[in-house]
Image (cartoon, helix red, strand yellow):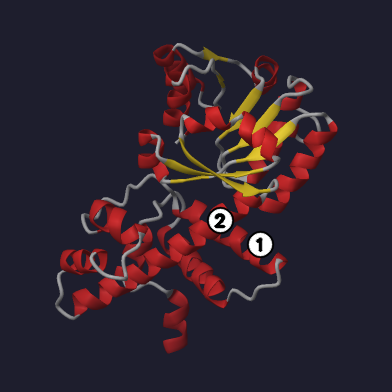
Amino acid sequence: MGQPMAGHMVNAGWNLAIYDTDAGKAEAFAVSSKCINVGSLAELGERSDVVVLMLPDGGIVRRVALGDEGQGDHLLRGLKSGSAIIDMSSSAPVGTRELGSLLQKREIGMLDAPVSGGVPGAIAATLAIMVGGDSRLAEHFDPLLAAMGRRFHIGPLGSGHAVKVLNNYVSAAGLAAAAEALLVAERFGVDGNVLVDVLNASTGRNNSTEKKFKQYILNRAYNSGFSLDLMVKDLKLAMEVARACDVPAELGHSCLRLWEDAQSWTGSNADHTEFARFVIAGGAPRAAEVKG
């Protein structure tokens, strides 16, 4: 997702320096987009007034920003007082606030700005961007974020990440319900395509029925571009937020257990739409154990 997002920033007139662990991919993008490909995180920080991060999880974000106990290549080796970091990854909300406090001591600002919309939204610049942090800082960088999608200022630092993982919980629950309904319908003799059409014209419609089932599931493509591992990670974070807020979230914990079963069944690096393949194949090992 980071590549098309960076492309939109270039097209909007921003001067970019980029860094990626895949040096070949970064160089190809730099040549095609006429931006600078730097050789280290420290150099990236040194060249930047603001660094935008799009990474797999908050642990990686922290290492990129601070290094391992201050050692190794990291952004703080180059970032100047008055600069800022915008974390557009899906990170742990509590961890984001801790990182923000550490950066504040160095007079470096931070916003969390996770996104929803997947690879198609990144390509089309139609992402929903959930911004957490100081409102003045958010307003200052709004023109930059505007190049990538629609912005929602959620509240203080970490609240964007909290809303993002809660959104993914609701999304995961919707996909799970639709996958189970599809299995029941097909065993009853109803064509899956017909079920999806009816759901999308009725109250059962959701993002998965509208944008995933015909596009990635019924055709057995399973290539939406968002991994099942990351969905499980976001569900765990959502339940951590619920626990911190003293909310039982019984449905949420059941949903997480089911997605963890799918993760075990599919193995690593599966697309999240393969959850439906797990359901259709009669997965749910815990349910099978209970029956036994």
x and y percent of residue 280 in the render?
29, 69
Which residue is the site of mark 2?
Answer: 165
Residue 235 relative to residue 32: left or right: right
From the top left corner, tell me how far across and down residue 189 is, in percent. 14, 78
Pinpoint residue 292: horizontal percent, then vertical percent: 43, 88
Return the mark for residue 95.
Answer: none
Task: Estimate how packed mark 2 is, as few (under 14), some (14 to 19) or many (20 or more) residues with alpha carbons within 10 Å.
Answer: many
Kindly identify the residue that appears in the image at 57 percent across and 32 percent down.
Answer: 142
Pointer 2 and pointer 1: residues touching (CB < 8 Å)? yes
When the figure is inspected, residue 20 is found, relative to residue 283, above or below; the finding is above
- Residue 162 vs residue 222, the one in the foreground: 162
* In the image, residue 282 above or below residue 38: below
Residue 233 can be seen, yes or no: no
Q: Quadrant of residue 77?
A: top right
Q: Nearer the viewer, residue 119 or 223?
A: 119
Name the residue: 31% across, 65% down.
Answer: 205
Could you say where residue 46 lies in the image, as x and y percent from the top left?
70, 16
Q: Is residue 142 above or below residue 240?
A: above
List the residue tagged with mark 1: 241
Q: Which amino acid does label 2 sit on?
A: Val
Quadrant including the N terminus: top left
Q: Secondary structure under badge 2?
A: helix
